[in-house]
Image: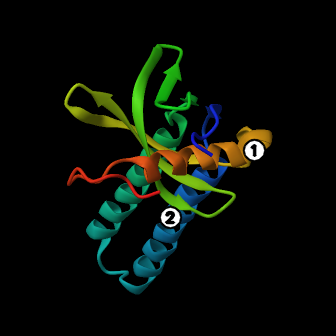
């Protein structure tokens, strides 16, 4: 196969990502409660710890509610991020691959190369089950065809 097929991926808030955030916060809560029970004579530090736990929980909830939503489009040559505000070229990198779950980093491309992060996205077959294999091929096709920085030909 010379090119990975074009594919359009709907991206929204991830239940798995929400579960990871909730598990991390609940772990912190459990450790905070255990510490609280072991150190009953330190009321000032306990209040600070409770405030930090509440702040972290609120930050995680806000981050999940404001998660990237839009469409990730592979046209056979380039990736494009599309939202209600328009579309722009992006670079997509696979950060974690668990076969039925992908963690990808999406960054804007500007004239100088790679720009700021759009965000981290959890991709699952649930968003586009009929195209899951095509999505995986497109993600790995781009990574395997880039030329090495020394200018030699890319590996087949």
First-in-chain label (1 vs 2): 2
Frontmost residue, 119 versus 3 = 3
Q: Nearer the viewer, residue 2 or 70?
A: 2
Quarter assignment of residue 128: top right
Q: Position of residue 87 (x, y in %)?
A: 46, 18
Mark nearer the viewer, 1 or 2: 1
Residue found 47% across the figure and 57% down from its top: 156
Residue 14, image x, y percentages: 62, 45
* Tag 1 residue: 126
- The disc at residue 24 is 2
- Tell me: 90 left or right of 84: left
Q: Quadrant of residue 131?
A: top right
Which numbered dot is residue 19?
Answer: none
Residue 75, percent from left and from top: 56, 27
Front residue (pair 71, 16)? 71
CB within 8 Å, label 1 to label 2? no
Q: Secondary structure at mark 1?
A: helix
Give me the residue at 27% from left, 66% from top.
Answer: 44
Categorize mark 1 by other alpha carbons within 10 Å: few (<14), some (14-19), many (20+). Answer: few
| Circle 2 crowding by C-alpha within 10 Å: few under 14, some 14–19, many from 20 | some
Q: Residue at x 75, y 44 (%)?
A: 126
């Amino acid at each position: 196969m010379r090119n990975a097929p074009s594919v359009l991926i709907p991206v929204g808030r991830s239940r798995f990502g929400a579960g990871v955030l909730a598990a991390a916060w609940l772990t912190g809560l459990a450790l905070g409660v255990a510490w609280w029970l072991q150190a009953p004579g330190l009321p000032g530090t306990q209040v600070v710890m409770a405030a930090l736990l509440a702040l972290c929980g609120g930050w995680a909830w806000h981050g999940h509610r404001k998660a990237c939503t839009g469409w990730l489009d592979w046209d056979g040559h380039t990736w494009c991020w599309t939202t209600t505000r328009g579309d722009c070229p992006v670079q997509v990198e696979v950060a974690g691959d668990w076969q039925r779950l992908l963690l990808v980093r999406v960054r804007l491309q500007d004239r100088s190369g790679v720009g700021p992060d759009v965000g981290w996205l959890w991709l699952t077959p649930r968003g586009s089950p009929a195209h899951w294999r095509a999505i995986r091929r497109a993600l790995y096709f781009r990574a395997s065809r880039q030329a090495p920085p020394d200018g030699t030909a890319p590996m087949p």
